[in-house]
Image (cartoon, grey):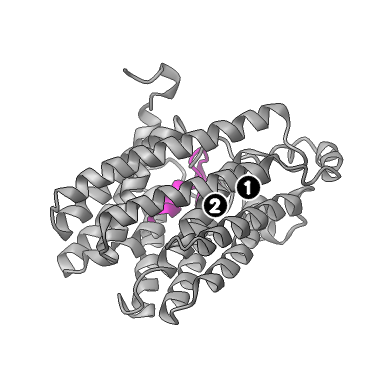
Amino acid sequence: MSLPERYRPDLRDGGHALRVAIALLVPGLVLIAWGRPELLIYAEFGAFAGMYGRGEQGRPRIVHQVQAGGLLIAGEALGITLAHHQAPPCLLVAVGVVFATVCSVLSDAVRLRPAGPFFFLFAMGATATLPAGLAPPWQALAICAATVVFAIVVGAIGRPDPFRGRPWWDGIAMVLRRPAPGVGIHALRYALAVGIAGTAGVLIGVDHANWAMAAAAVPLAVIDAGRPSDAETGLVLTRATHRTLGTFVGLAVAAALLALDPGPTALALVAIALLFPTELYTARHYAVAIGFFTPLIMLMTELADPTDPVRMLLYRGVDTVIGVVVGVAVALADIGHEGAEEAAAEPPQYRGQQAGGRCV
């Protein structure tokens, strides 16, 4: 059964997805040629910088990709540091709460799209749980930073007037200006959801609580400041359903691929290839995008830290359920009731800026 027409990607989706895929393909081929495909996970999150500014042209798109790239590098820097010092899970959760809160405020302040701290938090958590000796910290961070720069360059090639638009310093001014009303409430939601989900993962003994923390952030990206409206409540439940279904389909795909035991090089190439359909569907159908995104992450995790595939996939399913349930509960809680009037009174150009659309 084919997807309804409104969910089918168009040529513009394909061009954007191709750029994002190339941003990972080239660094990935370099790492494979170097004989270090297990380091691909560090490049992966750097390539995600190319996902930002999807609907923008000229300088504003580059500015948003630079801002997102900076947060992705910061996330990996924190994760690499935690891994290097073999930080306990409780410290990972504490750092994740603080980082998610800061990234929520910053991403809302500059109106990044995809909205929210999901990718930045995920970059931190995923790298924090890698083996300490996988690569020297400077080397791992250099791979991420170089990929971010490459992704921004690829995003500008072939575009008309890539440097046209607001002055460069506007990007700094957006960070320093007073955020729109309700941004603090939105950040509080992320802090609560990430903290509760991460703590639950640690308490029940599920490895890699970072996946639960990241999953908890997902439903929050589709709501605005103040108490969620009826329409936003529906979006939250839809997003949670898509995340859960897409993840379990993706886990089944990952299980099938890992059962073939194709070897590190083949796993790396398949993981790189999965980024194209992930970004192709990211603005069209969230569940389909997650169906590709999940095996991408699983394969890269297996490359970096081989483990029992059955246990890994089982834990990822449990983590997802924990995170989604917590995220939905926090999203629908009456947090920010007093901030709703402030959000309603804000200027029209700011209204709804915290909402995340259908992006991953």
Q: Is residue 304 left or right of residue 129?
A: left
Determine the secondary structure under disc 1.
loop
Verify CB contact (< 8 Å) between mark 1 and mark 2: yes
Is residue 273 on the magenta stretch?
Answer: no
* Residue 221 position by quadrant: top right
Residue 57 visible, this orientation: yes
Three-letter code for the amino acid on which mark 2 is drawn: His
Whether residue 169 is visible: no
Ranked by sequence position, the earlier of labels 1 and 2 is: 2
Give the magenta range.
47-63
Q: Which mark is residue 234?
A: none
| Other residues around mark 2 within 10 Å, as few (<14) / some (14–19) / many (≥20) | many
Residue 56 in picture, x, y percent from top left: 52, 40
- Seen in the picture, residue 91 relative to 208 is either above or below; the reply is below
Say which mark, if any, is on residue 111.
1
In the rendered view, tell whether residue 50 sits above or below residue 86: above
Front position in the image: 15 or 38:
38
Spot occupied by residue 31 in the image (x, y as percentages of width and height):
22, 65
Q: Secondary structure at mark 2?
A: helix
Q: Give the residue at the far front of this rendering.
A: 204
Q: Is residue 102 above or below residue 344?
A: below
Magenta run includes residue 54: yes
Question: With respect to residue 47, does 54 lie above or below?
Answer: above
Residue 64: which disc? 2
- Where residue 311 appears, as percent x and y from the top left, is 32, 56
Can you say which quadrant of the picture contains the N terminus?
top left
The residue at 34%/34% (across/down) is: 14
Residue flagged by tag 1: what amino acid is it?
Arg
The residue shown at (36%, 46%) is 294
**What residue appears at the point 33 percent right and 56 percent down from the top-left corner?**
312
Q: Indicate left or right for 345 with 139 as reference.
A: right
Instruction: Name the residue: 46% across, 55% down.
Output: 211
